[in-house]
Amino acid sequence: MVTPSDIAIGRPADARGALPAVSLIVPTLNERDNVRELVSRLDRCLTGLDWEIVFVDDDSRDGTVDVLRQLSRADHRVRLLQRIGRRGLASAVVEGILATTSPVIAVLDCDLQHDETLLPRMLERLVASDCDVVVASRYMQAGGVGDWGEQRQLVSRVATNLAGLLLRAELTDPMSGFFMIRRNVFDQVVRRLSNQGYKILLDILLSAPHGLRVEEVAYTFRSRISGESKLDTVAVLDYLALLIDKAIGHVIPLRFVMFACVGAMGLIVHLSVLASLNRGLGVGFAPANLAAAMSAMTFNFFLNNMLTYRDMRLRGFWPILRGLVSFSALCAVGTAANVGVAVVLFEQKYTWWLAGLAGIFMGAVWNYTATSIFTWRNAAPADQQAPTAPALLANPAEPAAVSSAAAPLQTAMPRQR
Ligand code: GDD
Ligand code: MN
């Protein structure tokens, strides 16, 4: 007899040994010319299986959504989750999964680079080996990266090795975007995910409290024929951010780490401008220092806007000007707090460096908390804001996700912090 727990873990759901139902999650960003072909290929290779596809689209502007709606109207197994004002492969996949209920979930790209004919075998392996995740690997003996250039191969290798430092599970391709996972396993990790950037599988593996049982199957990454890759330098930064968050995120929020790193770079800008004006050009110390502070502040604002707060980046002349003014004003208060705390501690006989460090810490915490509330939190229009506690105290890993099983789905999501 099949028990509810058998179904929950994805064991064969009936006495004839039928395989469990699978929800395929496919993130899309400008993939108009690939979606139709992907659906027809999946339809062919999944014959006999109980499947559905949820496309999660981040407001593609090339007509992808129109094609998806047509497909969805013609076939109820094809569904669309449309996100507006959002970006990010990992969070798209998570929200797609949350909108489904099958005991097994498969994730694959829309651009036909992942070999979909592997799916039935992946499902059989998941059930037969009773493992948690089946990963399609480019780096096993029989796998391959197709026509990748040397630079991309190198980046991928370095990233894979870096991940190996944190991973407990043994696998050759933790960076794969093509995998199958049991729903109950996903449910155990979903609240711990960083949701950072591109690498959802790695995020899942690093978030599992006891390590996961992983099986791999080999495949060769195909070339992209239509559309273009969205992986860019920001994706590399996102990747590093994910690793940092997984390594120390439970102690210090990732955003604060980034904010502090930008602050440290600002210090270098400050000293360089001061040296060139005062030492080099002979400008008096006070005006040179003022100019240095303003340059550093401006530099910090733009870098934070680009990196630390890239998910809620201020755009357009007035929002940026308003942001710069509020950032500078708040940081001026932070500097006053920094100096004040340091002086008070120094007068209470703390060593100079301890008093100095405490001041810096105080200033940094103030700057971070205040600017996260007043400079960036106001970036989203009122109806798009997440009602959250001050950023430093809150957990940045909490996904701003919805769960729904209605089809087709359309949501205007609140922006993530
Ligand atoms: N919804 C959404 N939002 N989809 C996105 C986003 C986004 O911000 N960025 C990319 N996508 C979609 C693309 O439309 C495509 O279907 C898929 O995610 C992969 O994007 P690509 O830009 O083609 O990635 P890639 O080929 O360079 O890398 C992929 O394959 C590697 C090997 O498996 C990714 O899956 C990597 O994570 C993976 O390592
Ligand atoms: Mn691709």
Image (cartoon, helix red, strand yellow):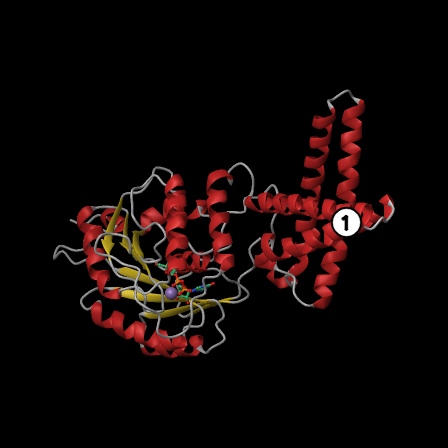
Type of residue at label 1?
Ser
Answer left or right for 396 relative to 148: right
Tell me the quarter of the picture where residue 252 sits.
top right
Question: Horizontal and vertical percent for residue 308?
Answer: 60, 52
**Furthest residue toward left:** 16
Answer left or right for 43 relative to 231: left
Residue that mark 1 sits on = 276
Within 8 Å of ligand 1, the CB of disc 1? no
**Furthest residue toward front:** 280
44 shown above or below 159: below
Residue at screen point 26% across, 65% down: 116
Question: Horizontal and vertical percent for residue 207?
Answer: 41, 43
Answer left or right for 298 relative to 93: right
Circle count: 1
Residue at screen point 76% across, 45% down: 275
Residue at screen point 40% across, 60% down: 96
Answer left or right for 252 relative to 72: right
Tell me the quarter of the picture where residue 299 sits.
bottom right
State ligand 1's quadrant. Answer: bottom left
Question: Horizontal and vertical percent for residue 386?
Answer: 59, 55
In this view, the residue in front, 271 or 381, is: 271
Q: State whether residue 395 appears in this view.
A: yes
Q: State whether residue 391 appears in this view.
A: no
Question: Horizontal and vertical percent for residue 406?
Answer: 40, 66
Residue at screen point 24% across, 57% down: 143
Q: What secondary structure is found at the residue carrying circle 1?
A: helix
Q: Residues within 10 Å of mark 1 (few under 14, many from 20)?
A: some
In this view, the residue in front, 77 or 262, is: 262
